[in-house]
Image: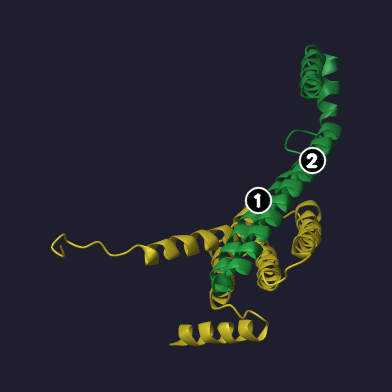
Chain colours: A green, B yellow
Amino acid sequence: MRKSLLMTLAMVLVASAAYASDAPAAAAAVAAVGPTAAWATAMGMAIAAGLCGLGQGMGLKAACEGTARNPEAGGKLTVTLILGLAFIESLAIYALVVNLILLFVKPLGA
Amino acid sequence: MMQRTLVQKIDALLYRRGFAVADARKLMRNQILLAAGGAALACLATGFSNWGLSFAAGALIISVNFWWLSKAAQELVKVRDGAVFTLLTLFYGRLVLTGVAIAALVAWLGASVFGLLAGLSTVVINATLWGVLQIRHKVPATGNGKEA
């Protein structure tokens, strides 16, 4: 599975380099950045949101367990949890902004 | 004096809105003050330019986000079953709403991306400052060696 993924990635990279070698093909490659950026955006956001959601869930699980074991430490745990969740959520939002830049501002071309 | 009154008013408002944990209330109050102060400073310093307004928009979005997150976290810690599912649902709901707001700002309103990112970073600055101050308060004062 991992091998085939790496092979596909290598083929895509080699193919784009080959297309970019002559002038008309280079123009075509630049035109193809749009759909590629859209795919990259979708994949990037999916990965970022999925992993950040997973991280938040794990943090909350640990905080719930801690509170259940030691209810007196609930207040301190809540603040630590909020800080952790805020950091993770800000990562997701940064990923979102970068993806929106790729999608709408198009720094890599049309 | 005026600053203390403002802080007390914000604290009272937060308490009425369900921020029962004292430290969570302080954290939210710091975020409100940092976002409002930073937005005002950015707007005034740049003469209400696109960058300043984008900073204010970013700070507002992230503060609303943080408000919901803090309120949810205070409730969720007490929940024994189904907390993770509820948190994930809230997370994705919030992310979708934030995404729509940021997409509208970037794509249609032409907001400055760097201003927006700076505004969104206010929550990270707030959390980092909080952590640093907590560590400083917890570090015991070192003696001069004569105690022994």
Residue A110 is drawn in which quadrant? Answer: top right
**Vertical comparison of B61 with A28: above or below:** below
Query: Which one is nearer the viewer's eye here, B78 or A14?
Result: B78
Image point (80%, 19%), residue name: A16
Q: From the image, state whether disc 1 or disc 2 is nearer to you.
A: 1
Residue A90, percent from left and from top: 65, 55
N-term mark: 1 or 2: 2
Is residue B89 something that shows in the picture? yes
Q: Where is residue A107 drawn, in percent x and y?
A: 72, 37
The spot of residue B48 in percent (x, y) is 62, 64
Residue that badge 2 annotates: A41
Describe residue B10's horizontal placement relative to residue A46 as left or right. Answer: left
Q: Nearer the viewer, residue A37 or A46?
A: A46
Bin the neighbour count of mark 2 within 10 Å (Cα to Cα): few under 14, some 14-19, many 20 and up. Answer: many
Crowding at label 1, few (<14), some or many (≥20) Cα neighbours within 10 Å? some
In the rendered structure, the answer to whether residue A88 lies left or right of residue B143 reads: right
Identify residue type, mark 2.
Thr
Q: Secondary structure at mark 2?
A: helix
- In the displayed structure, A82 sits above or below A27; it is below
- Chain letter of the residue carrying label 1: A
Label 1 belongs to which residue? Answer: A91
- Answer yes or no: is residue B50 visible: no
Q: Quadrant of the N terminus of chain B?
A: bottom left
Which image quadrant is residue A38 in? top right
Label 1 sits on a secondary structure element that is helix
Q: Whole-percent x and y of residue B43? A: 59, 65
At x 83%, y 32%, the residue is A36
Residue depicted at 77% across the width and 20% down the height: A3
